[in-house]
Image (spheres, rainbow, N blue to C red):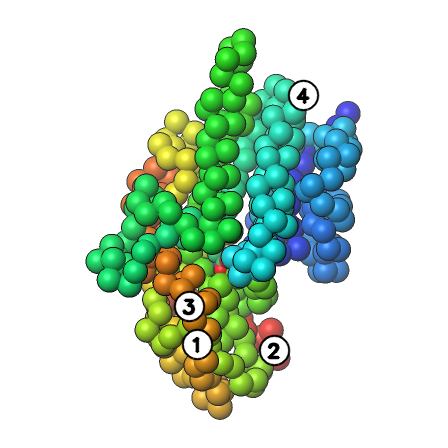
Amino acid sequence: MRKPVVLITGANGEIGHALIANLARQRNLPVVALDVNALDPKAASLVQREVTGSILDNSLLERLLAEFEVDLIFHLAALLSSRAEFTPMAAHHVNVEGTLNLLEFAAHQAESHGRRVVFIYPSSIAAYGLPDLDTRRKAGQVKEADWNTPITMYGCNKLYCEHLGRYYAKHYKQLSEAKAPLIDFRCVRFPGLISAVTVPSGGTSDYASEMIHAAARGEPYACFVRPDTRIPFMAMPDAIESLLTLSAAQSDRLTCTAYNVRGFNASADEIRAAALKAFPDATITYRVDAKRQSIVDSWPEDADDAAARRDWGFSPGYDFDRAFHEYLIPTIRQRYGL
Ligand code: SER
């Protein structure tokens, strides 16, 4: 008998950490955690099985197929937007081929146990690409179908994988003999995520988290975007809630492949002010990196999350004030023993 489990790829990343902690706390679901790096000991103690390896290793995926029965996959593994610009080929391998491998894995799982596999995929505001600041200001809250012209490798990878997922869910092998769909692909487009517990690596929205964590640690920080740079963000607990709510949603209610979610939209200077209010001795300056700035400037000022609210009832628990006062600042103080 194979063991029924939930599979999480990229389990050692920022979202993976929070998702594992949440699943262990709230639901009694055995988790198989896959990551290229070993999980940190705390996360490792919360999962049924830790597998260290790559989503590009097909023989590893075959072994997982033989050993486990999977109905739900959170495919989180990816190289983020800044990192991907230095190694676009590696980004394509991990972000696109890795996702294709996981979709094939999910299809084989479904064939083996006869049930549709729910495949949860985090896409990103990087899937959008707005041409200039004026257009961006006028666009305001963008809808899912607007401005799908990303300028980064990561954004292109994410947008293509949304389509791949839609293909596997709705049109897979459409010229072969008709079969029930194998995959139930569901995707959220995340804004910048801010966690009180972990610091992201390789992203371009990282300035928000880096600023707050540096302030708490008493280290000076030079923010790499202009003070007026405004994009949507979300507190990590809301991000996890969105993944779990979407995974449990009734499938006939879902009218979109990819759903925007957002918590609040804030400028770099508003985040700086909130960090300084909490940690008044901090030094936060600006040293704008024009290239990273132009990536952030291609992302929307805000995202329209009406479809997620309508189809699966999602509404974020944390606006800007709650995110800082009830989550980020108290949890970060605790994390650094302040
Ligand atoms: N946070 C991501 C990044 O900065 C965007 O999804 O790459």
* Along the line of sight, the residue nearer the viewer: 162 or 298: 298
Name which residue type carries label 1.
Val
Label 4 sits on a secondary structure element that is: helix
Q: Nearer the viewer, mark 4 or mark 2?
A: 4
- What separation in Å lies between label 4 and label 2 (alpha carbons)? 47 Å
Sequence-first disc among 3 and 1? 1
- The circle on residue 293 is 3
* Along the line of sight, the residue nearer the viewer: 124 or 131: 131
In the rendered image, which residue does mark 2 sit on? 336
Label 1 sits on a secondary structure element that is: loop
Name which residue type carries label 3.
Gln
The quarter of the picture where residue 251 lies is top left
- What separation in Å lies between label 2 and label 1 (alpha carbons)? 28 Å
The quarter of the picture where residue 113 lies is top right
Q: Are marks 3 and 1 in contact (CB under 8 Å)?
A: yes
Residue 258 shows up from this direction: yes
Instruction: Give the vertical position of 203 relative to 226 (above or below).
Output: above
- The circle on residue 297 is none
- What separation in Å lies between label 3 and label 1 (alpha carbons)? 7 Å
Q: Position of residue 29 (x, y in %)?
A: 63, 41
Instruction: Give the vertical position of 331 relative to 1 (above or below).
Output: below
Sequence-first disc among 4 and 3? 4
Sequence-first disc among 4 and 2? 4
Q: Nearer the viewer, mark 2 or mark 3?
A: 3
Task: Tell me what residue is drawn at x 43 percent, y 81 percent.
Answer: 286
- The circle on residue 112 is 4
Sequence-first disc among 2 and 3? 3
In the rendered image, which residue does mark 1 sit on? 288
- What separation in Å lies between label 1 and label 4 (alpha carbons)? 52 Å
Task: Tell me what residue is drawn at x 43 percent, y 76 percent.
Answer: 288
